[in-house]
Amino acid sequence: MIAFKKKTFKVLYSIFALFSCVALGKLCSYFVPVLPSSLYGLIIFTLTLHFRLFNADHIKSTVVWCLKHMGVCFVPAGVGIINHFELIKQFGLTIIAITFATTFILLTIVGLHYQRYAVDEE
Amino acid sequence: MVSTELLSAHILSSFVVVAGTITLFQLIAVLQRKLNAIWLQPMLISILVIIAILLWQDISFENYFSNSWLLNALLEPAVVALGFPLYQHLETITKQWKSIILVLFIGAFIAISTSFVITMLLIGDYTIAVALSLKSVTTPIAIAIAGQLDGNTAITAFAIILAGFFGALVGPPWLKFIKVKSPKAQGLAIGAASHAIGTATVSNISYEHAAYSSLALIVSAVITALISPFMITFLAGLI
């Protein structure tokens, strides 16, 4: 029973922490519209944990669970491809080929360069 | 009375859509683990199965999207949750901030220029070239810049999803193949090339992957927002 209460407290505490950072992110994005609110929220969440405004030990288990299952939240937006069938018919293969090639270039450049720098620094 | 019935029908259909999407996603995730098949990516396969169901049942995307509001509402807190792995590696990251910014700057510069030039040469359409130049950045920022630079926002959204899946699916095996084995370098590369979709996928591999990928997601988005208007105007003048 005590373990259940502790778990419930941690879940509620994490939800409160996450949603307060979401709200603060929205506020920042409203006043300084440089980044989207979710990225402001991400930065604020990192800072609140770093400066111990929220207790990371209470949050860890819930956030690990969230990170493991967050992929499902991207599904509805991804289904949106269905609305671009006409464009895909017209330029689809070329767009796919360019996206594929340039994503590979970016992955390779960032991966190789950073590995070299990181090894040098370590 | 009628509005109450409509409301309860909407709640019921929302429940069916959300529960159905989650169940499908989890089933594929279990299957992927059992078969140990990387290509069986739960996010991608769920999208394809749902598209097939919508086309088969003649259901509009708008109808599906409005009923999946709960998952959309959780998208923002899910991205915010990526701040946790970032916090855990903050100390190491602050020690390497110079090399991280330099590498991501080079990455963003090359991504924008190669995509823009190749698209102009192959398709010859400025609006599509702008859209593809921004495909590695997280959706809200890319759409805002695309609108600002007269790019095609629908193609921007499509290319962002494509880049996300390419990096998420092929990124880890490709990086291993070219001998980039450090979790930091892998995370950074996938975050820079495949934004939140890539980050969500590599978060399952390790905490270090998640931390560096989240960092690349933020830093690349800021760098692209700052340099792309100048670069695209300059490149458009050259071609």
Image (cartoon, grey):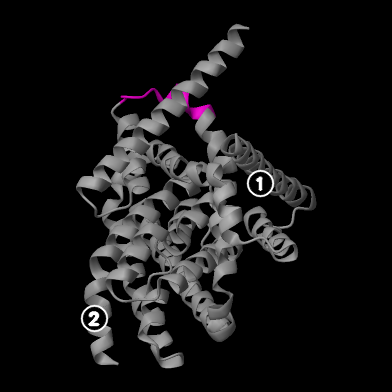
The answer as to whether the residues below labels 2 and 1 share one chain is yes
**x then y, percent, for residue A12:** 48, 22
Query: Is A70 placed left or right of B218 in the picture?
Result: right
Where does the magenta region start and end? Answer: A52-61
In the drawing, what numbered circle is on residue B233? 2
Q: CA distance from mark 2 to mark 1?
A: 44 Å
From the viewer's perspective, is the residue at label 2 or at label 1 nearer?
A: 1
Q: From this viewpoint, which residue is outermost toward the front?
A: B1
Q: In this picture, is B5 found above or below B129? A: above
Query: Is A97 placed left or right of B150 in the picture?
Result: right
Dot 1 falls on a residue whose secondary structure is helix
Subunit bearing disc 2: B
Amino acid on which the number 2 mark rests in the picture: Thr
- Residue in the picture at 48% in, 59% down: B190
Amino acid on which the number 1 mark rests in the picture: Val
In the drawing, what numbered circle is on residue B124? none
Query: Is A60 placed left or right of A82 in the picture?
Result: left
**x then y, percent, for residue A109:** 42, 70
Q: In this picture, is B37 found above or below A83? A: above
Give the mark, 2 or 1, whose residue is nearer the N terminus: 1
**x then y, percent, for residue B35:** 79, 53
Dot 2 falls on a residue whose secondary structure is helix
Viewer can see residue B177: no
**x then y, percent, for residue B237:** 23, 89
Where, quadrant-wise, is the N terminus of chain B in this rendering? top right
Q: Main secondary structure of the magenta part?
A: helix
A59 part of magenta stretch: yes
- Residue in the picture at 50% in, 16% down: A9
Q: Which residue is mark 1?
A: B17
